[in-house]
Amino acid sequence: MQKAKRNMLHPEDGKHYFELFLPLLSFADQDTPILLGNLMDMKRRANIVWRDPSLIDGFIQDMDSKELERPLTEEDRQILRSWKRFRTGAFYVVSHEASGTFLVSKSKEVYRIKGLQSPMEELFPNPPVLVETTLLPWKDLLIADGIYTLDTIQNPEKVRDTLQALCRQAVMNDTVISSI
């Protein structure tokens, strides 16, 4: 269990992430109330933001113009602005290590991410798994936005060997991407 706890954000950071992300999703489509727990609604709203990252600036301005119980801090603004460096696409979940979960993009870039509020190995216990998601910077780490769409992998045993070799090579060459 100790290994798993290292493969996720500190609980306060996980909570902080959702305190920023959920209102951003709500801002993306202000005409309809957000359906918390509805993956399709959350994905639709996230796609609105990722198609037009300038919405992040609009969200910050909107939040700054309101009298809020918890106004945005400068750190919040920096985190939100950093999300404009997102990477959306298909990623293979390859393996789980204490330092993070290894993902490989279709273009063979190797990423190391942390889980948001639970270890990634709880979400994807049997890699390889092909997921559609969005990678985001979180301070000096890399996370996924928490919205995953699963896809099927043809011949997972063969793919596993290839992906693991790519990850080993990236670790040896120090080319693992752990921040964007």
Image (cartoon, rainbow, N blue to C red):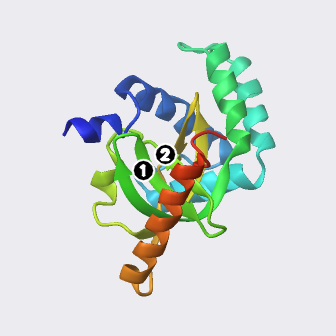
Describe residue 19's horizontal placement relative to residue 96 as left or right.
Answer: right
Q: Is residue 58 above or below residue 119?
A: above
Image quadrant containing the C terminus:
top right
- Judge whether residue 94 can be spotted in this image: yes
Q: Are marks 1 and 2 in contact (CB under 8 Å)?
A: yes
Depth check: give the residue in front, 136 or 42.
Answer: 136
How far is the residue under mark 1 from the one under mark 2?
A: 5 Å
Depth check: give the residue in front, 60 or 171.
Answer: 171
Describe residue 24's horizontal placement relative to residue 94 as left or right.
Answer: right
| Residue 79, quarter of the rendered image | top right
Amino acid bearing label 1: Thr
Residue 72: x and y in percent read 63, 18
Q: Looking at the image, which residue sits at the far front?
A: 172
**Image mark for residue 2:** none
Q: Which residue is mark 2?
A: 113
Describe residue 175's horizontal placement relative to residue 123 as left or right.
Answer: right
Q: Which residue is mark 1?
A: 101
Task: State the residue at coordinates (35%, 66%).
Answer: 127
